[in-house]
Amino acid sequence: MTTIDLPPNLDDTASVSEGLASTTGAGPDRAFRGLAVAAGVTVLVVLALITYSTTKSAWPAFSKYGSSYFFSTDWRPNSKQFGILGFVWGTAVISFIGILLAVPTSIGIALFATEVAPQRLRRSITTVMDLLASVPSVVFGLVGFYVLRNPLQDLYRWLGDAVASIPLLNRIFGQDGSGISLLTAGIVLAIMITPIITTVTREVFETVPRNDKEGALALGATRWEMVSGVILPHSLGGITGAVMLGLGRAMGETIAVTLLIGAVANPEITIDVLSPGEAMPAAIARKLPEAAGDFRAALIGLGVTLFVITMVVNVASRRLVDVVDRRLKGAA
Amino acid sequence: MTATTAADRSVAERLTVPSDVRVSTIKGGRFVRDRIATIAMIAAFVAAAIPLVFVIGNVVARGASVVTPSFLTSDIPTTASASELKGDCELRQRYDPTAVCEEAAAPAVKPGMGPAVIGTLITTAVAALLAIPLGILAAIYLHEYGKRTRLARFIRFMSDVMTGVPSIVMGIFIYTLWVLQLGAGRSALAASLALACLMLPIVVRSSEEMLRLVPNTLREASAGLGARTWKTTLRVVLPAALPGLVSGSMLAVARAAGETAPVLFTIGAATTVARATTLTGQSTTLSFQIYNLITNGGKLSPQMAWGAALTLIAIVLILTTIARTVSQRFTMR
């Protein structure tokens, strides 16, 4: 694994003989190493700068409004009221919808790709996922906005009427649905995070020991019994990590959500997913370009909050995926 | 191996096959459940493929007639001149039947995206120039020098975490640091910095993976010939890993080219090709223009937005395809 380190006394002899020194060159090596270390440390510096610079610009809002900034739903820039809870709720709802739709789909695709599909099809599954991941967010927003808005409105109206007399469901699927809503944003998020969850889940499934799978089949299990009895229990940690990774992506996704969620200025906490709402990144994208003063600080504070939440989710997901990695290396 | 024992146990627990079942006769219920599961898996794949086909199909169908050489090179019509469109005149006729709509009366405003094409290429290229060398150098530190040291592990973990930082946070970061605190103003360069921040962790992680694929025997052979790590890295490891590094970097570039959020607060505005052909001045990009066209509306907007979307998807797909081709060559070798 490690490269061969020359013993220190050899270094000394090299520096004595000038001809040898020019070919072995401890100086260039030290310089190159320094350059590489500096590049590595740059990553840390950038992260530190992100934290410092954004927090500094958001500080006026944090210090002035204190806990009411985080725990109030009252967001009225004109009367200097800044409570972000409505946006946090919006982000939570659409991310939940996104995860709810994307996770079963992703697990299904990953199982299809590792267990069912013939070899030739497996490669095209990868291609489809790569292509889906490479479609820019704004293009999803464009198609949703110009093409899907009206059909979705009809669908939502029909859905709202259909469940109008069923308790709870009639509160989740309200009757005044427009095509632009929390549900629409959630569906687009599901499409956008499916490739990443599928890719990670598939890698996790590939770490399941062959012996376990073949053992199950040899005991007479059907393929589904093998999947539910061997693959899924074995992959639980890795799947959780993949889901968290997708969750982090979903919470930070900006442009498609901005175009499809509905631009509510002061969103309430509602469980009606057919009503328009607003999410944290969408509110920033919409208002920050022309905001100033406290309003600007409050919007940047929204960004800092988003940054902190996604960092926590990402650290947790990395920990989970790392555990799977370690198990893979231990088993190999 | 110890880790698998838990799984082994769960296998035994879950697979207690009734003793009267023989291998050849899988009972109806179990067979049906297996079939349903298989069909559900296929359905999941179809469910993911449909949006892809739908999105790309729509963009191609609606954008193809718009994208012409002149669309890609001419200035973006401003709102003032766009209001003189023939379509607008026809709208005016509904309220004022005497209005005459001749081709000559409405100066032909052609849709154009030239500044956005140039802006996209400039900002993405500058971001790539900043992020790729830095990212590959950082990967060299991680894999050739740092290895399992505490600092290297910390940097590796942090760049993993940084890949998950939302792109809009990168935009806010450059906006607060560059525009607000340093007072440097919005520009193509500021947008490039934000995109570079987005690309950096992706390049670091993918490059380290590629360096890992270079066989250690090559490094040992080079060290055996007396070369130090820097020489081994530059002369042996990097050439061997080059296709992989290129493909990883291209994927990062493709991602950056399609991003809107980091550009939103940092790039400013430009509507003429002449203005957009700068690094220190304000500019615009395709993704930003699409967003603008949708949110601001206007007669010509949908048409121009579809054209811009097709152009953008073409750029992103070309970059992705190059990356995939290069990496396939790499793995085949």
Image (cartoon, coloured by chain):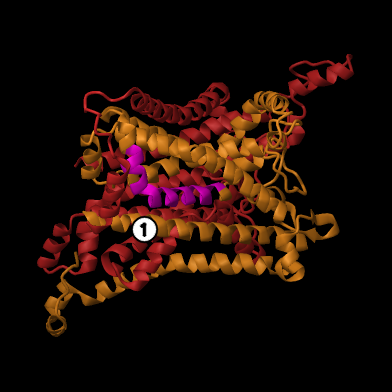
In this orientation, does residue B322 appear? yes
Q: What residue is disc 1 on? A: A322
Q: Is residue A165 above or below residue B203?
A: above
Residue A69, given in percent of the width and then of the height, sits at: 73, 63
Residue A327, given in percent of the width and then of the height, sits at: 29, 56
Write the residue at 30% across / 58% down. Answer: A326
In front: B154, or A232? A232
Q: Quadrant of residue B150?
A: bottom left
Write the residue at 74% across / 17% down. Answer: B103
The stretch of residues the image draws in magenta is A227-250
Left-right relation of B178 to B323: right
- Among the chains pictured, the one given orange colouring is A
Image quadrant occupied by the C terminus of chain A: bottom left
In this view, the residue farthest toward the front is B20
Residue A270, given in percent of the width and then of the height, sits at: 72, 45
Q: Chain of mark 1?
A: A
Residue A236 forms part of the magenta stretch: yes
In this orientation, does residue B114 appear? no
- Among the chains pictured, the one given red colouring is B
Secondary structure at numbered mark 1? helix
Image quadrant occupied by the N terminus of chain A: bottom left
Q: Quadrant of residue A8?
A: bottom left
Write the residue at 49% across / 47% down. Answer: A246
Residue A244 forms part of the magenta stretch: yes
Residue type indicated by callout 1: Asp
